[in-house]
Amino acid sequence: MTQDFDPARADHWIAHGRHPAHAAAIARAWRDFPDLAPDAPLAERQARGRERIAAMRPVNDAIAAEGAARQEATNFAFTDRQLRDGNGSDRDIAVLRGRDEHGYGWDLANRYADGWYAAHVGWPHRYPDGIPSRAPLADRRAAYDLGFTAGGGDRTDLFDAARRAIVAGMRRDNLPPAPTVTLPGRPLPGNWPKPGDAPRPARWSRRLAILSAGDIGGDPAWDFLGLLRARPGAGAATVIVLTPAGFVCANNTVRSDVAEQMSADRDEAARQLGQLLASCEFDDILVTLQGHDLDVLDAIAHVLPLARTMERTRNSRLQQRSHLRTWLDRGFADGETRAQGHIRWGKTIAAFYGSLGEFTVRHVGPAPGRGHLIRVETREGLATGYAAVDGTPLTPEIIVSNKAKLRPAMATALRAFAAATPIMAAARAA
């Protein structure tokens, strides 16, 4: 949250990723039950907080329900896509059968599949009650029983388990030999990990970002290309955008509202991307494509150059923006020096801190005036007397405008000090 954030304004909640309807309800609750003055009696301030929480409970419940429904839809879509691509299993088929034939949600469809698969492979009837679930226990057991019966199980038969084990063994013996699977020579972009602060920083001139046309324009807070270009030195990076017309350089982007759809010709898409990346070498690649756009890139992944670090943004829109910022924090310009290595983060009762080598950076608290103060220290105390390789002195006390920027600022300070020269510190001690 920024310093000027007003919880009674819906547009401020929308800017932080809330749906307009949810933002309006939350802002209304804050207007109806604003905070009392700090000198008001404690009991009255606590009562006001409870009133506001009660007013926001319906919208919080709606947000939770929508999130659960969206997660279920995503899980079913992934399972369906696995089957279409030939990567699914018999259990995946049972999951979709539980949904289509019995109207089960994700949790109950999986319990149905557990029962069906147990009967199919000859296992005894056993409820998987230890698996966390939001569904009532009775419903989970009923779904398991239904799946167990559909898979050929008969709990009234004394010899049911032995019969099914024999049938399952015969079924395995009659299966054709498994085909030889040729693994791809490189991981597909859809399998790349999310950005983190552990990989080595890279110069902007050796970085590649592949964005979607939907990530460009509109609200500046969600314009990924704008966020990238706002970073000092990021103009040296290579940025490619997947538009409805195909892959283009970021300087020649086509708006995402173009009516025509990109051609399904994978050879043409591969040719476009290959021309843009011809004779290029990269140390760090980021992909922000999602859904169908990511499938397009997976299909022509052989065109992408191999790099030391290959990552992609994922999950919700808010998390994708957070992943992008993490990736941006690892870039630095030519002539600048950054230390590599994994930053060890921690939190105590007093402060949030991070360590790299001999340096530790801590969040001290509010800075004089506005902002938050972070301090770089060594075992001897405040890290004074250090300079960058170009001789620029490094300041061990840094003011950050708001808490949302604390971790990136702390990581930047740590990598700058860890790459600095201690000559000035040694001369001062002498």
Image: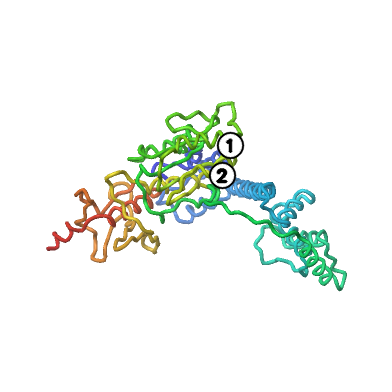
The answer to which quarter of the image holds residue 291 is top right
Name the outermost residue toward the top: 259
Q: Secondary structure at mark 1?
A: helix
Mark 1 or 2 closer to N-term?
A: 1
Please state which of residues 192 and 107 is positioned toward the viewer in this rendering: 192
Q: Is residue 161 above or below residue 174?
A: below
Image marks 1 and 2: residues in contact by CB distance under 8 Å: no
The answer to which quarter of the image holds residue 352 is bottom left
Q: Which mark is residue 68?
A: none
**Residue type at the position of mark 2:** Asp
Please state which of residues 137 and 426 is positioned toward the viewer in this rendering: 426
The structure residue drawn at horizontal position 31% and vertical position 62%, both measured from the top left corner, is 357
The answer to which quarter of the image holds residue 123 is bottom right
Q: Is residue 9 above or below residue 173?
A: above
Q: Secondary structure at mark 2?
A: helix
Name the outermost residue toward the right: 157
The structure residue drawn at horizontal position 72% and vertical position 57%, both measured from the top left corner, is 91
Please state which of residues 407 and 296 is positioned toward the viewer in this rendering: 296
Q: Position of residue 316 (x, y in %)?
A: 54, 46
The residue labelled by disc 2 is 298
397 sits left or right of 275 in the view: left
48 sits left or right of 87 in the view: left
Q: Nearer the viewer, mark 1 or mark 2?
A: 1
Give the crowd class for mark 1: few <14, some 14-19, many >=20 residues within 10 Å. Answer: few
Q: Is residue 325 above or below residue 254?
A: below
The structure residue drawn at horizontal position 46% and vertical position 36%, both measured from the top left corner, is 240
Q: Position of residue 335 (x, y in %)?
A: 27, 45
The residue labelled by disc 1 is 266
Q: Position of residue 385 (x, y in %)?
A: 19, 56
**Quadrant showing the C terminus:** bottom left
Q: Position of residue 389 (x, y in %)?
A: 22, 51
- Using the numbered discs, state the Cα–Cα distance from disc 1 to disc 2 in whole angstroms: 10 Å
